[in-house]
Amino acid sequence: DRALWEAGWQHRPFYPSSNILGRLPNAVAITGTLVTPVVGYLGPVDLADLSRRANKAEIAEVFAIPIQDLLDPTHMVYESILLGDDMPAFMSGKHRVWGLTAFILHHFLIEVALPVLLEDPVLVDPSTPATTLGTRPT
């Protein structure tokens, strides 16, 4: 299965103009898989185009969550997992981000986004989607 997944890399979204900003500490999935989260700025993203190009066998839906929703404590919940720990999950409308994705996102928000926003709150405009975090409005 993994070989077939890897063979389909050409059909996955690719962002040649992406700007890699850095990486977060490695995270280990409950399955034991080591994940290295990389943070980058993709620029404007066409969700409709991305949705059309997404591998339907891997991705149920393409969506964006505004950074304001991610930072709003009323949109965050903690869920118990089998190991007895509580893990963060994020809610936005009908969407729920959970598991390893939520764990990495939570780490990003605490270690990167919040310190930047506390230093300069003008970096996030409530009408701007999450993909523009770190850019200054003109």
Image (tube, rainbow, N blue to C red):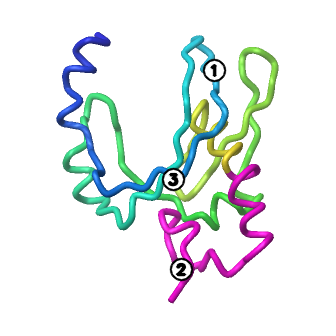
What's under tag 3, amino acid-wise? Lys
Q: In this view, does 32 lie to the left or right of 81?
A: left
Residue at screen point 27% across, 44% down: 13
**Where's the N terminus, which quadrant?**
top left
Secondary structure state at the residue bearing disc 2: loop
Magenta stretch: includes residue 45 = no
Give the Cα separation between the discs numbered 3 and 2.
Answer: 19 Å
Give the Cα separation between the discs numbered 1 and 2.
Answer: 34 Å
Q: In this view, does 118 lie to the left or right of 124?
A: right
What's under tag 1, amino acid-wise? Val
Q: Name the residue under label 1.
A: 28
Q: Position of residue 130 (x, y in %)?
A: 53, 64
Q: Which quadrant of the structure image shows residue 80?
A: top right
Count residues near mark 2 (Cα–Cα under 10 Å), then give few for <14, some for 14-19, many for 20+. Answer: few
Q: Which label lies toward us, 3 or 2?
A: 2
Q: Name the residue under label 3.
A: 94
Residue at screen point 78% across, 61% down: 115
What's under tag 2, amino acid-wise? Ser
Q: How many labels does the image show?
A: 3
Magenta stretch: includes residue 123 = yes
Above or below residue 68? Residue 21 is: above
